[in-house]
Amino acid sequence: LAWDPDAVDRGHSKTIIGYYASWQWYDRMNLAEPKNFDFSKITRANFAFFQITPEGDIYGTDMWADPITLFGFYDWMAEAGTVHEYCSWDEPNVEPNCMAHNYEEGLIYLAHKAGAE
């Protein structure tokens, strides 16, 4: 889903940033899952945290929660090669972790659907 800044008419031109820390996925009995947020109230979703290598590459800090939060829960029933896979870089200088996800449940899809960056 491509980002469309005009997907929601907010009635203003302000930039409202929603901050989501990756560790929130574990808290409050899943209350902080992206599907429980109203992304139409923000214009930009700021996801934390990533690390940067001396070479300038970025990688996530939580190899379990980061991909699930960003791309939705793993689709364990997906047959390899029949669905799109989303990749996360979870450690420096290591190949990305690519898996099938229920993308419509992830922060990226939900934020873009609501018109947020």
Image (spheres, rainbow, N blue to C red):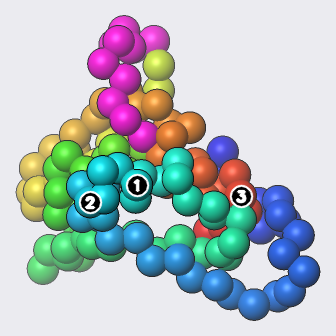
Q: Position of residue 92 (x, y in %)?
A: 10, 61
- Amino acid at pointer 1: Leu
Mark 2: which secondary structure? loop
Query: Marks 1/2: CA distance?
Result: 7 Å
Check residue 111 in the rendering and tell me which mark sits there, or answer none.
Answer: none
Query: Which residue does the numbered mark 3 point to in the structure image?
Result: 114
Q: Position of residue 102 (x, y in %)?
A: 46, 31
Check residue 31 in the rendering and tell me which mark sits there, or answer none.
Answer: 1
Query: Which residue does the numbered mark 2 point to in the structure image?
Result: 27
Q: Is residue 4 left or right of residue 83?
A: right
- Amino acid at pointer 2: Asp
- Amino acid at pointer 3: Ala
Residues rendered magenta in the picture:
72-82
Q: Are marks 2 and 3 in contact (CB under 8 Å)?
A: no
What's the residue at 71%, 65% (across, down)? 40
Q: Position of residue 31 (x, y in %)?
A: 40, 55
